[in-house]
Structures are given as structure tokens and as C-alpha cells.
Amino acid sequence: MSDTNAQSVSFVRDKMLPESAPPTLERGVVKWIRENLFSSILNSVLTLGSIYVIYWIVAHLYPWLANSVWYASSLNECREIRDATVGPGVPSACFAVITDRWEQLLFGFYPNDAYWRPVMALVAFLAAIAPVLFVSLPRKLLWFSAASPFVMFSLLWGGSIWGPITLAVGFGVGYAAFVLLGRVAGALVSVLGSIIAPVLFWMFLAGPIAGALTAVAPIGLPFVESRSFGGFTLSVIIGVSGIVLSMPLGILLALGRQSDLFIINKVSVAFIEVIRGVPLIVWLFTAQLILGYFLPPGTTFDLTLRVIIMVTLFSSAYIAEVVRGGLAALPKGQYEGADSLGLDYWQSMRLIILPQALKISIPGIVNTFIGLFKDTTLVVFIGLFDPIGLSNAIRASTDWNGIYWELFVFIGLLFFIFCYSMGRYSLFLERKLQRENR
Amino acid sequence: MSTITDPPKPGFRLSQLIYDTRYRSLTIQTVALILLVLAFSWLISNTIQNLEALGKDFDFGFLSSRAGYDINQMLIPYDNSMSHGRAALVGIANTLLVAFLGCVTATVIGVLVGVLRLSKNWIVSRLMAVYVEAFRNVPLLLWIVLIFALLTESTPQPRDFREGGSASMMFSESVAITNRGVFIPNPIWGPNSGILIAVFIASIIGAILYRRYAKKVLFDTGRLLPMTWPALAIAIIPTVLFYFILGRPVSLEYPVLGGFNFQGGIQLRNSLIALWVALSLYTGAFIAEIVRAGILSVSKGQTEASFALGLRPNRTMNLVILPQALRVIIPPLISQFLNLTKNSSLAIAVGYMDVRATLGGITINQTGRELEGMLLLGMFYLAISLIISSLMNVYNNSKKLKER
Amino acid sequence: MKTVFLGVLATAGLAAGVAGAATLDDVKARGSLNCGVSTGLVGFAAPDADGVWEGFDVGVCRAVATAVLGDPDAVTFVPTTGQTRFTALASGEIDMLARNTTWTFSRDVDLKFEFVGVNYYDGQGFMAPRELGVSSAKELDGATVCIQTGTTTELNLADFFRVNSISYEPVPIETNAEALQQLLAGACDVYTTDASGLAASRATFENASDWVILPEIISKEPLGPLVRHGDNEWADVVRWSLNTLIAAEELGVTSENVAELAAAPTNNPEINRMLGTEGELGAMLGLEASWAADIIAAVGNYSELFESNIGESTPIGLARGLNAQWTDGGLLYTPPFR
């Protein structure tokens, strides 16, 4: 032991100090607040402004929601309950209208005991698109996807099941024609055959066959008129059938727009531009007011179907633009590679180009669907009972005359849930595709 | 030796039309053309038969007959003794007005929100996200109806502005916000106001010329002239001077409460405001996403490289980031403008008298000329959208990435 | 694509048949009457919570369905807006329109429709808040007026203010419900529509007594059901179904005593002819002999229909006024059943 050491070094720490906590300003919530909310003057102003906005909204909405009345049979009864519980003049929501009419808002005038049918149709639809949307599922499920339009049709409209089945057989006829003619004659003939054969089948054979089968074995659900569709069921039906039915036409239009054939190209461009240039509401009025002029004299079919046809044509133009984007995004090497393999136009499209182009178009298609689904509310202007139309009809009953916000909140919320989740999915897919392409 | 294969036989066989790629495209197109013509003639003959059956004709004469209905918002003079054609023009003017106003505000909202959504301020970026998602995922129609109802319910009635009423005018008795609309002062153009306008336009041109000159000096000599303040001064000061020199040629007519409602001034009707606000907020949400994507699309290396060159942050933004981001932003932005214009046809929900309400609504309803009316209406919208999209193509071509 | 789709529709049996000249046969073959109604007007047509349509106009549809098919529920109600109603009728989408539609010259002649009668005599009136202090429509100079667009009221309004040389500011609104919201909030000074609609709406206000209906009736609005031009057999069926309702009230036949009166001939030959116990009026129309009795049994007579939907015992509380029988000083006057 040396003293010198002890004298020259007055103090030596031989143990680690315990860690002291960081200054209050630099830790935990305070630090987070400082960095995220008050990092500069501008930021502080923005933060305070935002907090005020949130406070303002909550302060106005909260009492209205907190005092809401859920069980009453009319608006006047709601007001009486409010007067009795919280006093007159206090803001109070009357959600009793929702408890009274929610079935109508969801299903329209669909028969009460058959509500399971639209629900099952929705389930069938979700099951059908699952293999398209999530690649990890087994490919065999795609057969169900192909069958699902007919399943959904039978569920929703009911009637004899032989109609949809013969309809589906028509597609089988088309495929058979394609394969058989493909062996005998060239590709072009087989393509033409695959279009003409099913059309002939549907025009001349399908009706009698379906009729005969129905007479022999009348299987099927009770028929429901499309006029009974309403509320969200109607929105979903118009939106979904618009997108699904428009896919074939949309793809053809996209190919037409890319085509070198002058007339085909110009016709596709003209169709797409005309449809996209005019607002949907004008097309809906066209469906309502003047579609009848273009059909053979005397033909008339019901408004819901006319709207579905119009919406299909409408969305096919938008789908065409999305698919065109997908086609344009493919590297040129893919086209050249297909050509160098000696594939003809339809083979190269079917086997090489379209599978890739459609895959990258899915997010765009989902976004188109969201837009279309929201736009289905416009059918209220031609007298169909979509949710907004129903809210008007509900207001026209003596019980609920004068009720607004509650219905709007309910309708808005349902649309939001539907569209937001689809939007999230499309975003997820976009990111995934980006990762894969990197 | 007959190793040489026979030369292809000259002459034309019918099967070449299908099997020879040189002719096949012609065949296909001819067939397509024939089908198209057939389809059209089918539609047209149906229409003729149907019109005959209904005892109607195809005639645009109704456009010159008396309309008989009133329109509340008129940008061009109109009264109910004028023709249906005139009413359609009033409607067109109203459509263009709301579309223009909507495009301007939607852009402002979209850019602000798009930038704020990228802000590091947690609460602000969350709030902006909520706004964007709420407006993107709920139908526009619902928003229009909701905002219209909100304006009606939450603003005072004109009679509340009377003595002892609960409401009062703003900005020294010049602006009144009522549930019938916002009343603002109306400028009265006096005798010399033409000169004033000329001076104003001239000074704006002057300001632009100055900026161009300053830029030229910068590029030629590297000397940096101040830009913002002198340009602003050139634009404003002469106009103000002339305003007083000419003896205040422009005066304001204030709205005053009289009878049932405010008289004088300009009335921005609630239907216009609701439609305008809803269209701007809805389209603004979409534009915000476009702006955000545009800014994110510029790679971080660009910013870093620009800093490495010694550029200051705002110059980095102006000279490096924005020009690149704009190339991504502008095309979808224009298609949003197009959407907004088409969506303005939802004016029907709030009773705004746009072209669909006059020509496509009341006129069709009173005259029973739906075929002609809808045709004109469709052609109007088509013309607008073709004009805008051809402008977009011109712009796209001029800004296309110039590669080697 | 289109042909394919039409083929699809045809196979699915959804493309409805051909709207031929004989609407009566079509309706019988179809087994249901397509009746155009309003998308919702208090007291006249509105669906209830179960989707069952109720109202005064709905009653007329049910009467016709009962006459033709014997079943008041064999009606498909097709909601139409002010803008779409005429096309729906002209195109054959609906067989008849019972949607408080005013009988005018141009609709009858130029638009090629056939009004079969009047089920409600109405007139365009004004409703204003009491505190506005207005007692006559002529004092409305400079007022803001809410109107429903796509109706005759727009034209009447323009004419009225032009004739009286006073100015106004029109606020066109798509539906009755929205117009009421505007009025209640004070966004318009007065609301103008058919006086029946005004009274019906006022009945649902929180403070109905704060609102006055101005005395002026500025137009004649005979509201009635209409059918397409050129099918007189069908027009006759609809016309006499409506007349049955009115005549039944005049003759004292109600839904309660109709079974008894129709069981055996009574002393009154006109009742007998109407109810089918004498003569064969039904066969002349191509209907069952009991068609009129069925109507009255199913929907009641005019008075019952009126009282249960819009009369003084309902919240709407309309008085009969012009719509009383001619014997009571009203305008209801049917041609005799002979």
C-alpha cells in the first residue's frame, strides 16, 4: 500500500454510479410531446389548433350521442322520452329510427323470411373473390369463383335453378367450341366460334331446355322481384355486378385500345372516352329515360336491370383504363418473348401478357370498385331505393318525418366500413406488388 | 437439280384473307366495321320506330320556346319569358362556375393537407389522415346533403339580424352569413374604372416581366436580384395610386336587411356554398393523397445531393423536389379536376341550378324532349372533358422526361 | 356483349314481356299491377317498416288491382320521382300512375297520356311561419320561396309573381322532406306546393300552430291517376275503379255493409248494377261481376280511404273541402253506373 498514490489521486471511483434518469424534458411522454407536438412555433400553433378542432367537434357531438334514445316508435315519442329524461331542448339523437328500420336500410323490401339469401350471396361472393385476392389459397377454389355468379344469382333472385344452369352451360358450349374448332381450324375461327356458339345456344336452345327441365324438376327458391331489392343490398348488387360483368368487356376494350388495327382501336377509344366523359348521373337518367328508345319497340325490362346494364357499361370503360395501365406497365421484353416463342396474338395475351397485367391491375380494379360502390347512391335520383333513397322514404312516413342526422350517420358509417377496409386491402396489395417487383 | 424451291405463286387466294397476316387485319377490321354499322342502324331504326309509336319527332325547336320557369342564380341575364336554350346557357354558366371554384379550393386544400399529412407533428398528421379517410370512403352525395343540412341548421336566419336579434353582420356591417347564403358587398364600377382595370393588368404583366428579367440576370451573371417584394410592389402600388388619382371609381354596395331578406350586395346561395364546399373537401382528400404520393416519389438521394451542392432547404424544395414531384402530381390532379366537374352534376341534391337541373331537368320535364335534352347534356359534358384531357396531353408531352 | 346480355336476361326470364296495346291482358297474365307512386309523400304514398305501401294514392292502385285481379296486394309499387314518372308510364314500365299528378292540357295531349279522373282536387298554396306576419301571398315581395322541382308548381309560381308584378327568389328542392327542412330552419320564407301537402307536412311539425297556410290558392291542381294514350279498355278499367270508390260513398256502400248489400239485390237498382247483382257491368269491362264489390270490400269507399289516410282523424288532418260529394257542396261527381 503506497501513500503517494493516495495523495496524488485525491479520489478514484471504483464503482459505477447508478444510471440517473434523463432530464424530465428528454424522456417519456414529455419528450415525445416536445418532439412531436411542439418542436417549433409553427408546430405548436398547429397542435393547439388541431386540439381545438377536436374539442369543438367532440363538444358538439358528445351530448347529442350521450343523450340518444334507442327505443321509440316515432320521432314524437323520441322527443317525449328526451323531454322526460334530459329535459326539453337538450340535443339528443334519436337512434330509435335505426332500431326500427335497420332491416329496411340493409335489405330494402326483400321478404323478411328470406334475409338469409342476400347474406349467403354475400358470403358466396367473398368466398369467390378470396382465391383471386389472396394467392396463398389453393387454385382449385377458382372453379368455385367461376360458378359463383350463378350461385349468387340463384340466391338473390331465386326462381328455377335451371335458368342459371343453362346459362352456365352456354359458357361450357363456348369453351368446347373454342377447343374443337381450335383443332380443326385456325385460332381466329375458334375465337369467333367460341363467341357465336354460346350466343346461338342462349338464343335458341337455352330457353326451351330450361323450361323443360323446370317442368320435369322444379327445384329452386321462391322468385324475388328485383324491385324488392333496396338499401345496402341494392348498392352491393349494383356495385358488384357492375364490376364483375364489366371485366370481360373492360379487358377487350383495353386490348382494343392497345391494338394496331385502326378501326378497332378508334372504336375502343371512342367508347371509353364517351363513357368516361359524361357523369354517371347522366348515364343513369339515360337508363331511365331513353334506353327504351334504343331497344326493339315494346321491349321493356325492369329498372334495376337497366341500371345494372348501364353501370356495367360505365365501369367497363374505367376497368379498361386500369387494365391498359397494367398492360403498359409490363416490360416490352414480355411481348417480344411471347412473339419469339411463336405464339399468336390470343395465345400470347392469354398465356403471357394478361395474367401478369391483370395481377398488377388488381389494386386499381379494387379502387374502381370503391368508387363505383360509392356512386351507386346516385340511383336515388331515378327512384330506386338505395340507402339514401330509403332514408327519404322513411322520412315520408308520419312516424319519422323530420329525422335526418341519425340516418345519415348510420349510412355514412356503413359505407365507411365497407370502403375503408377495401381501400386498406388495395394498399396492402400495392405494397406487396412493389416488394415483389423490386 | 431442283434444289431451288418453287417461288411463291403469284396471285391472290381467298384463304389469304384469313391466314395471311398481311390481309388478316384488313379482314378483321372490315368485319368489325360491318358489325358496328349494323349495330348502329339497328339502334337508330329502333329509335325511329319507337318515336313514331309515341307520336314524337326528333326536333330541337323546343330550345327556342318559352321556358316559363325561374332560375335563382344567374350569371347571364335571364327571366322566365326567355327560351329554354337561354335557360340551358344559364345552367352551363352555373356548372362552370362551381367547377372552377371547386377546382381552385380543392387544389389549395389538397396541397395543404398533403403536406401536413407528412408533417412530423403527430396530432396534425393523424387529424389529416382522419379527414382524408373520412371523405374518401363516404359517398359524395351523402357529404353534399350533410353539408347542406349543416349550413341550413347552424347559421342564423335573416330575421335574426333585425334590431335586437341574435345575429350580427361581420367586417363592419359588410358581410352577413345567413342560412340562405352569404351576402358580400358588390363592387360598383364607376366611370373611370376601365382605366383602373387596365392599369391593374398592366402592372401584373410588369411584375411578371420583372421576374423574368431577374431570372435572366441570375442565369447570365449569377447575381441574385430580390424577387418577391419588388414583384409584389410592381403589381400593387400603381393600382392603389391610380385608385386615388382617379377619385375612387370603384365603390362597394353593401347588403342591407330589408323586407324578408338582405337586399343588395352579392348573395352566395347556400346551394352553391354547400356544393362548392363538399366538392372541394371531397376532391381535396383525393388530391392530398396525390400530393403526398408525389412528394414521397422523389427519392431521398435528390434532397441529399442538393444539400451537398450547398442549396438551402427552400431552394432545394423549389428547384429540385417540386419540379420532379409535379411531374408525378399533375396528370392525376387534372383527372381529379375532371371528376370534380362531372361530380358537379350532383347539384340536383341541393337544388343548385346547374345545366343538369335546367336543361337536363326542368326543361326535359316540361317539354317531354328527353332524347334531345339528354343528347345535348351528354355532349356538353363530353366536350368539357375532351377539352381538359387534350390540354392534359399537351402538358404531359411538354413535361415528359427527356431521355437520351 | 349486349346481345349476350339480352340473351342472358331472356333465358333468366327476367326481360319482361312486351308492353302491347292490351294492358288489361298483360296485367292479368302477369298477375300483378305495376303501379307508379311517389317515392314518399306523407299520407299519399310511403312504405312502412315492413315495406308495405300505405296512403291515399296507394289505395287507388289497390282498388284497380282488386278490380282486375281480385287481390289488393297484387300490386308492384314502382316508386317514381317527379322527373321519371312520365317516362316510366310511356315506356310501359308501369301500367298506371297514381302519384298526385296534375291533369294539364299538355300532359293530356302533348305527352300522350290519358287522365282517367280526379281523385283529389288540390290547389297550390303557401305555408309561412306565423311570426313572419304575412297574411296574404301578395305581400311576399322579395320573399325566398322553396319549391319542389320537376312539377307544375314551378310554372304556377312564376306566373303568379309575374301577374302580381312582385319579385321572389326560388329555391328549387328535389324532395318534399328536404324542402321542409329548409323551411323549418328558416332558409326560405315560404314553402309552396299543393295545399294538401302543406297541411300534411304541417301536421308533423313540432309546433304546428306556429305555421300558417296563406289563404291564396294560386292554381287548380286536379290530381288524378293516368294511363297511356290509346288503350281505352284499360283506361276504362282504371276510370271506373276510381268512380266505384266515389260512387260507393255517394250510395252509402262501405267496406262493412258491402258483403251484405252484394249478397242479394237491394231496392236501389244503381247499387245492384254496381255490385253486380243486376246487369253485367263487370263483363262489359272484361272483369268479374263482383269487381266493384271486391274493391269496396278491400279498400273501402272514397270516404273510408280518405279518412284512414289523410282525413281529420289522422295526424295529417285534411278536411274534405272540395273533395266532398257534390251533394255536400264538393266537386266529387261520378257519372252514373248505368
Image (cartoon, rainbow, N blue to C red):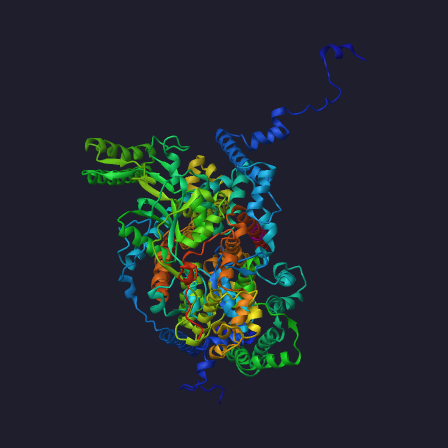
Residue A94 locus on image (x, y percent): 57, 45
> Seen from this angle, which residue lies furthest bottom?
B1
C145 shown above or below B85: above
Report the residue at 26% width, 41% height from top.
Answer: B205
Magenta-colored stretch includes residue A418: yes
Indicate left or right for B388 with C238 as reference.
left
Residue A20 locus on image (x, y percent): 69, 23
Q: Can residue A127 be seen by looking at this rendering?
A: no
B400 shown above or below B114: below
Q: Can residue A221 be seen by looking at this rendering?
A: yes
Magenta-colored stretch includes residue C222: no
Between A208 and A398, the one nearer to me in the picture? A398
Magenta segment's dominant SS is: helix
Indicate left or right for A335 with B383 as reference.
right
The range drawn in magenta is: A416-420
Indicate left or right for C331 with A361 as reference.
left
Q: Quadrant of residue C194?
A: bottom left
Between B81 and C139, the one nearer to me in the picture? C139
Q: Quadrant of residue C92?
A: bottom left
> Seen from this angle, which residue lies furthest front?
C267
- Quarter containing the C terminus of chain B: bottom left
Residue C255 locus on image (x, y percent): 55, 65
Indicate left or right for B209 with A367 as reference.
left
C297 shown above or below A415: below
Between A63 and A10, the one nearer to me in the picture? A63
Residue A24 locus on image (x, y percent): 63, 24
